[in-house]
Image: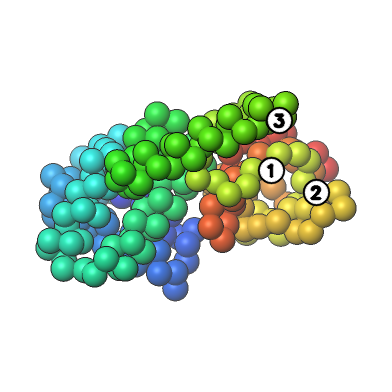
Amino acid sequence: MTLDAALARYREVLGAESPDAAEIERFRSFLATHAGLGRLATAPSGADAAGLDRLRCFHFSQYLDWYLQEKEGLAAISVGAARAAMRRLNDWLFGAGLIGPEDFDENRESILGREDFSALHREEEAEEEAAGSSGLREEKDFHVPGEYSAVLSGEFVLTKVQEGILYGRRAGEREIGPILVERLVSGGHRIGDRVHLSIGKAGDHWNLLSIGPRQR
């Protein structure tokens, strides 16, 4: 997949009215004009376009710590909002299976900055130590990024199916969503399907971590 196609897909998932969609477009412009990735989408076939693998962790820090501050002159609060948008983009890229765990972690460190990343890492280690001392052990059979405020895994009954978005309900619980997924995933499911999902909460939405076979 080309980098331009990946960013375009994410903007579609967000919707045109989302503030993040405007931020992603500004990030795209930065990549094309200042990051040496001018050929984002030079041919319909994508043959001459930059692939998603051209997006590197340092592009995020250049965008947040240099471009927005030095070139755009944005205030700290605006840069903070952009930083949060980049974290959500990174979450989506990983949840959609477009980047692997190693790239996700490297991007996250670049987006947060070393000081904030180190503080987050210390918090994660403290939580793991506390869980170990209490005798509790969290079952993890997939990579769980540290900034997810909640992680759920189990059988869901799908209650809404939209392009790139699912909603579902576990037995006896309230409806959960939106869950951001690949369009191929949402296109292959319908309301009422039973499916095993592992999802992580990122802000006001959930990212898909893994999905099992559907049952009808």
- Quarter of the picture holding the C terminus: top right
Of label 3 and label 2, which has the lower sequence position? Answer: 3
Q: Residues within 10 Å of mark 3 (few under 14, many from 20)?
A: few
Q: Nearer the viewer, mark 1 or mark 3?
A: 3
Q: Position of residue 26 (x, y in %)?
A: 26, 62
Of label 2 and label 1, which has the lower sequence position? Answer: 1
Q: How many numbered marks appear?
A: 3
Q: Residue furthest bottom?
A: 17
Disc 1 to disc 3, C-alpha distance: 21 Å
Q: Is residue 14 above or below residue 120?
A: below
Q: Is residue 143 above or below residue 71?
A: above
Q: Amino acid at mark 3?
A: Ser
Q: Secondary structure at mark 2?
A: loop
Q: Amino acid at mark 1?
A: Leu
Q: Secondary structure at mark 3?
A: loop
Left or right placement of residue 147 versus residue 201 in this view:
left
Q: Amino acid at mark 2?
A: Arg
Q: Position of residue 55 (x, y in %)?
A: 28, 40
Of label 1 and label 3, which has the lower sequence position? Answer: 3
* Res 107 seen here: no
- Quarter of the picture holding the N terminus: top left
> Which numbered disc covers residue 170?
2
User: In terms of depth relative to the viewer, which is nearer, 99 or 86?
Assistant: 86
Q: Nearer the viewer, mark 2 or mark 1?
A: 1
Q: Is residue 78 above or below residue 195?
A: below
The residue that label 3 is drawn on is 134
The residue that label 1 is drawn on is 152
